Amino acid sequence: MIVLRTFLALAAGFFTMALMLALATASARWAGKQPIAGKSIGAMLWNLGTTLAAALCGGYLTTTLAVDNPLIHALALAIIVLLLSALGAMQSRGSYPIWFSLLMVATGPCAVIAGGLLRLKWMGL
């Protein structure tokens, strides 16, 4: 039962992040604020900001739903986000400046941990 709750906590955090990023991307394209290529500074800052917000919410939710060791759950989600971010950066190499790719890889996991720590602080732990 604990394994199932752990999986559900991680899945909820990850799908929250994915849904927030999908909605942010769709709304930006619908409003015409983000070009399809996404190579302008404004589009890169939008991507960075939405990734930060989504990762904070994902880490917060994962820590909230964790049965025991909530920080371990946030760390597990951060590792998943790190691996997927690195894979995405490798696939899009040459499309963006290297500084942006490295910043995107680092932002997600750090924000997940920050969201988890924020929840722990509010819990009084």
Image (cartoon, helix red, strand yellow):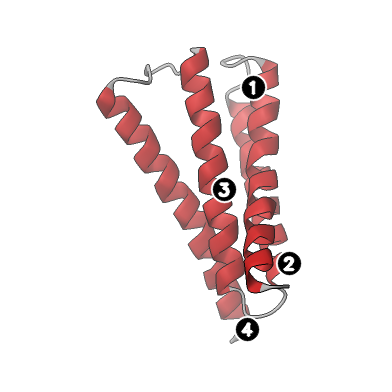
Q: Residue 46 in the image: state x and y as whole percent.
A: 48, 27
Q: If you read the primary sequence from the N terminus, does the residue marked by circle 2 or circle 1 appear first?
A: 2
Q: Residue 103 in the image: state x and y as whole percent.
A: 68, 29
Question: Real-space Cα distance between discs 3 and 1?
Answer: 17 Å
Residue receiving disc 3? 55
Relative vertical location of residue 20 with respect to residue 58 in this rendering, above or below: above
Mark 4 or 2, closer to the camera: 2
Disc 3 residue crowd, few under 14, some 14–19, many 20+, Cα 10 Å: many
Q: If you read the primary sequence from the N terminus, does the residue marked by circle 3 or circle 4 appear first?
A: 4
Relative vertical location of residue 19 with respect to residue 52 in this rendering, above or below: below
Residue receiving disc 1? 100
Mark 3 or 4, closer to the camera: 3
Question: Real-space Cα distance between discs 3 and 4?
Answer: 24 Å
At a point 59% along the width and 16% down the height, the residue shown is 96
Tell me whether the residue at label 4 lies in contact with that at label 1, contact meaning CB atoms closer than 8 angstroms: no
Q: Residue 2 shows which numbered tag?
A: 4
Q: If you read the primary sequence from the N terminus, does the residue marked by circle 4 or circle 2 appear first?
A: 4
Q: Three-letter amino acid code at disc 3?
A: Ala
Relative vertical location of residue 45 with respect to residue 57 in this rendering, above or below: above
Q: If you read the primary sequence from the N terminus, does the residue marked by circle 3 or circle 1 appear first?
A: 3
Question: Real-space Cα distance between discs 4 and 2?
Answer: 14 Å
Q: Three-letter amino acid code at disc 2?
A: Ile
Disc 2 residue crowd, few under 14, some 14–19, many 20+, Cα 10 Å: some
Q: Residue 107 in the image: state x and y as whole percent.
A: 66, 38
Q: If you read the primary sequence from the N terminus, does the residue marked by circle 3 or circle 2 appear first?
A: 3
Q: Residue 23 in the image: state x and y as whole percent.
A: 35, 42
Q: Three-letter amino acid code at disc 4?
A: Ile
Residue receiving disc 2? 72
- Callout 2: SS: helix
